[in-house]
Amino acid sequence: MNAVALDIQKIRQDFPILHQEVHGYPLVYLDSAATSQKPKSVIEALSRYYLETNANVHRGIHTLSELATSQFEATRSHVAHFIGGVANEEVIYTRGTTESINLVAQAWGDLNIQTGDRIVITEMEHHANFVPWLRLAKRKNAEIVYIPITGDGLLDLAEAEKLITPNTKLVAFTHMSNVLGTINPVGALTELAHKQGALVMVDGAQSVPHLQVDVHELDVDFYAFSAHKMLGPTGVGILYGKQQHLEAMEPYQTGGEMIHMVSFTDVSWADLPWKFEAGTPNIGDVVAFKSALDYLDEISMESIRQHEIEITQYAMDSLKATGVITIYGPEDVSLRGGAVSFVVDGVHSHDLSTILDTQGVAIRAGHHCAQPLHSRLGVNSTSRASFYIYNTLDEVDRLVDAILQARRYFVRG
């Protein structure tokens, strides 16, 4: 499908939350990297589930349970198609990207990482793709090393090749940085890892909402993302894993639903994907997630990407033109997503966010759950504006005007 220009004003009509004032100003929501807003179709799908279908899945033979199960599994099928046409058995429901990564760190990591093995991650990781591997390395007396970033916010692939050695068992990295916006070369890194016999875990929380992702083409072993960053509800995550790896892993949690048979002396596990889905799942939100995927399909990921390139370029140009703002990450927008982190001379990020909020502009401030990266950048915190399908160039102008007003307040003379 070819990219077409999005009708942003028409899209905005589908998002009720955007049509309000904050502190007397029209809301400008620039924090979609943290969580996206939800279209009416998703909100209505969630409401409709509880009004018409609410029942537990996989356990009942009555009509409501069968309807709920059908809708629950229909979302799984849509997810499988959305990420490249994988098998349904390779799509595991979790509570979010964080739980998906922790599942792999424990269910795969505890089984496969031994003393002296190497885990390779990067300096730009979100804590969710950093802390589980750090803990695993400590738990198993393994080595953890970090692929460095270059001055322009890209991964140093020459160093990556040196660090991914024959004793490397896992290479874990983000597809798109939530701070730098950097889109990492998944294919090249995966090739380096597989050449040494290592598996690959990709944090796709920022990429799947914004890029066309085909996990088959990328050849990754594990890939994780969250519904709430791509128009869906909170509390729903996806873990894709190659079937042979998932089959070999022990369950992350045990209890109801994920068993085949239990006796007083033994237990056997259910087939994939239910082997990893203990307990009553987040059924209503999973069902509503399908409406989010339908919405993205209708717009097309190619068109979303084209819109974000345009608005990100405009934002970076506008911020640079002030002469008082330092932007982090690649200069080339083709190498980055729609998250733009920056520092305003003389203004702390928390102060800036507070002042902008008084003018109805919502941005993120802090270390964005990436403290090691900020340490590497030499700053304690940054401000971040992140864009999605409902943002306009006029909203970028509002952002820049509000930043300049805030700076005049804090930096006098």
Image (tube, rainbow, N blue to C red):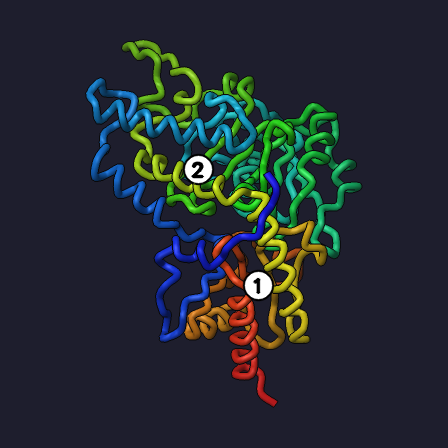
Q: Amino acid at mark 1?
A: Thr
Does residue 53 appear anywhere in the picture?
Answer: yes
Q: Quadrant of the N terminus?
A: top right
Q: Are marks 1 and 2 in contact (CB under 8 Å)?
A: no
Residue 96's quadrant in the figure? Answer: top left
Disc on res. 184: none
First of labels 1, 2 by sequence position: 2
Report whether 60 appears left or right of 232.
Answer: left
Above or below — where is 235 with respect to 342? above
Q: Is 120 on the left or on the right of 390, as rendered?
A: right
Which residue occupies the foreground of this view, 105 or 157?
A: 157
Q: Nearer the viewer, residue 153 or 118?
A: 153
Can you say whether 151 is above or below 204 in the image?
below
Relative to the observer, which residue lies in front, 178 or 166? 178
**Residue depicted at x 62% and y 57%:** 310
* 23 over 107 or under it: above or below: below
Residue drawn at x 55%, y 61% is 384
Q: Residues within 10 Å of mark 1 (few under 14, many from 20)?
A: many
Residue under label 2, please give it: 237
The spot of residue 388 in percent (x, y) is 51, 54
The answer to whether residue 116 is visible is no
Helix or strand or loop: what does disc 1 sit on?
strand
- Quick one: SS at disc 2? strand
- Could you say where residue 15 lies in the image, as x and y percent from the top left? 39, 55
- Residue 17, picture quadrant: bottom left
Per the image, the residue denoted by label 1 is: 382
Mark count: 2
* Figure quadrant of residue 312: bottom right
Q: Amino acid at mark 2?
A: Gly
